[in-house]
Image (cartoon, rainbow, N blue to C red):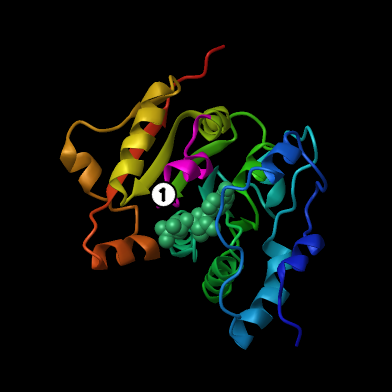
Amino acid sequence: MTQFTLAMDKKAHGPYMGAMRDLEHIKSSRIYGRRQGKPLKPSSQRRLEEWLPRLQLSKPESGASLDPAEYFDRPYDGYTLEIGFGKGEHLAWQATHCPDWGHIGCEPFLNGVSGLVDKVVQERLENVRIFMDDARLLMGGLRDQCLDRAYILFPDPWPKKRHHKRRVINPGNIRELARLLKCGAELRIATDHRDYCRWILSHMLQSEAFDWLAEGPADWHRRPDDWPPTRYEQKALEQGRRSTYLRFIRKPHRQ
Ligand SMILES: C[S@@+](CC[C@H](N)C(=O)[O-])C[C@H]1O[C@@H](n2cnc3c(N)ncnc32)[C@H](O)[C@@H]1O
């Protein structure tokens, strides 16, 4: 069997193919880390070959204004977006516990995508779609106010100053999330990195589009019951790092 590689991307199905606005800029400003780790187990490789083409979203066309409903086999009551789902344990949990919502995950790391595909197949989840690339490419092609929730859990902290430009929480992505989230929709962000936490809060609080849902430390040190731990969070805990859970609400859109 040939090893599954990123060439699979070319087989992506979906209503829209091709470039999108700002594509060239995004291509030249890569912000994620590695795309492939250890070779996949033969069983995961087979599952990926069989299932990813059914679950995978292609890059929206230039100027597209897609409704997430178009990506699913049936309409759902709401749609969520998870940026950087890692191995997908949080996304699979949300898909199981919120079966009336459609859940879209973005993750360029092949081994992570394989982890989510395994869970989708094992748990027979029909309400999951996967974009195996930089989330910015997908977000740019979605229509305004189409999301009911977004998650960015333990984004890479890029601690060196010269790498801060790769941080996924940045003014451009905050503006894009503000455009995509409906009024009252929640944006959840978690980090175990103190400096990144300060960065996230300062950028989010500068945005006039969001209110921070916190009154005291109990609110940001405690994970809500409908927010399961991620793999990265568990590693951080084992290494003695405490996590911060940040919840923001999209304010009403200006007319
Ligand atoms: C530190 S890991 C955390 C993974 C997972 N959320 C967890 O908590 O276990 C950050 C993930 O974000 C992904 N990522 C980074 N930049 C991204 C982007 N622009 N679009 C989508 N995923 C991205 C990386 O590939 C990586 O898997």
**Residue sitting nearer the eye, 103 or 109:** 109
Q: Amino acid at mark 1?
A: Pro
**Residue sitting nearer the eye, 126 or 207:** 207
Name the secondary structure under disc 1. Answer: loop
Farthest top residue in view: 255
Q: Quadrant of the N terminus?
A: bottom right
Q: Quadrant of the C terminus?
A: top right
Residue at 30 percent across and 62 percent down: it is 236
Q: Is residue 87 magenta?
A: no
- The number of numbered badges drawn on the structure is 1
Question: In the shown orientation, is residue 148 left or right of residue 110?
Answer: left
Question: In the shown orientation, is residue 23 left or right of residue 34?
Answer: right
Residue at 72 percent across and 46 percent down: it is 70
Image coordinates for residue 148, horizontal then vertical, percent: 50, 38
Res. 23 visible in picture: yes
Asked where in the image residue 9 lies, by quadrant, the reply is bottom right
Q: Which residues are magenta?
A: 153-171
Image coordinates for residue 201, horizontal then vertical, percent: 34, 33
- The reply to whether the residue tagged 1 has its Cβ within 8 angstroms of ligand 1 is yes
**Residue under pointer 1:** 157
Image coordinates for residue 143, horizontal then vertical, percent: 67, 32
Q: Are there few (<14), some (14-19), or many (20+) residues within 10 Å of tag 1?
A: many
Res. 103 visible in picture: no
Asked where in the image residue 206 lies, by quadrant, the reply is top left
Image coordinates for residue 14, horizontal then vertical, percent: 78, 53
Q: Is residue 164 magenta?
A: yes
